[in-house]
Every structure is written in structure tokens, then in C-alpha cells.
């Protein structure tokens, strides 16, 4: 829903979500490195929506994310930094404060 809100109207989504702490439950799409150094966890979104990208502030959360499997559900707590932060990649970004796999 977060990604869809930003896809529909960035200004409206910023008013509702920007810099707020959120708890997002999503399905892992991929874990990869961008710019040769930044690790990113991408969560599934609807096909036409902006990607939902999780950036890590702590190495232990990055480590946890690196061991998740594609399709696995995960709970991400963090601050929404919208679409402008980390503008080297397009999408809605979350600065992760904690991450945990969801029980299946």
C-alpha cells in the first residue's frame, strides 16, 4: 500500500508517510548491492508501482536481510524517507531500524 500511495501521488503520500516510523510486512523480491557498496532489500509491489526499497543503518539488519529467501515474508520497522532520498535509485525508500522474518 505504501508503494501504491507514492505511485499515485507523491505529494499526498509524503504528507501521510514521509519521515514517519512505519511497520511494513512484505514479501522479499530481492536482496542486492547497488553502486558496488549499498545493500538493498526490495519488497514485492504491484507490477506498475514504484519499487519498495529498504536501506540498512545497522550491519546486523543487513546480515539478517541477506539470509532471507525470495518470496519469504518479512517485518520491517523503519522510517519512510520517500522517493527523494538515495536518488541514485528510483523507488520508495525505508531506513530500516529493525527487520525480522515473519512466521509462516
Image: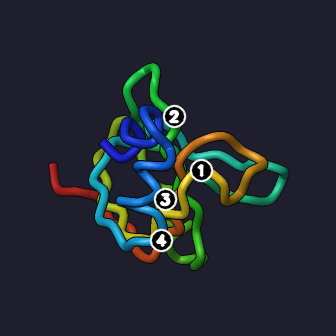
Q: Secondary structure at mark 2?
A: loop
Which comes sooner in the sequence, label 3 or label 1? 3
CA–CA distance between discs 2 and 4?
Answer: 18 Å
Which comes sooner in the sequence, label 4 or label 3? 4
Which comes sooner in the sequence, label 2 or label 1? 2
Which comes sooner in the sequence, label 3 or label 2? 2
In this rendering, position of residue 35 left or right of residue 63: right
What residue would you read off at disc 3? 65
CA–CA distance between discs 2 and 1?
Answer: 9 Å
Query: Residue at horizontal 31%, vertical 54%?
Result: 74
Query: Disc 3 or disc 1, which is closer to the eye?
Result: 1
Query: Disc 2 or disc 4, which is closer to the eye?
Result: 4
Q: Are marks 2 and 1 in contact (CB under 8 Å)?
A: yes
Q: Secondary structure at mark 4?
A: loop
What residue would you read off at disc 4? 19
Q: Which mark is residue 52?
A: none
Q: Quadrant of the N terminus?
A: top left
What residue would you read off at disc 2? 50
Query: Residue at horizontal 33%, vertical 41%?
Result: 27
Q: Secondary structure at mark 1?
A: loop
Q: Are marks 4 and 1 in contact (CB under 8 Å)?
A: no
Q: Which mark is residue 83?
A: 1
Which comes sooner in the sequence, label 2 or label 4? 4
Packing grade of label 4 (10 A; few <14, some 14-19, many >=20) is: some
The x, y position of residue 102, in whole percent, is 23, 57
CA–CA distance between discs 3 and 2?
Answer: 20 Å
Amino acid at each position: 500500500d505504501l508503494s501504491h500511495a507514492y505511485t499515485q501521488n507523491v505529494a499526498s503520500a509524503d504528507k501521510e508517510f514521509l519521515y514517519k516510523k512505519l511497520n511494513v510486512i512484505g514479501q522479499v523480491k530481492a536482496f542486492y548491492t547497488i553502486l558496488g557498496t549499498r545493500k538493498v532489500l526490495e519488497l514485492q509491489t504491484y507490477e506498475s508501482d514504484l519499487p519498495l526499497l529498504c536501506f540498512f543503518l545497522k550491519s546486523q539488519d543487513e546480515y539478517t536481510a541477506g539470509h532471507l529467501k525470495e518470496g519469504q515474508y518479512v517485518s520491517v520497522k523503519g522510517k519512510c524517507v520517500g522517493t527523494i532520498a538515495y536518488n541514485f535509485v528510483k523507488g520508495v525508500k525505508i531506513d530500516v531500524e529493525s527487520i525480522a522474518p515473519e512466521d509462516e
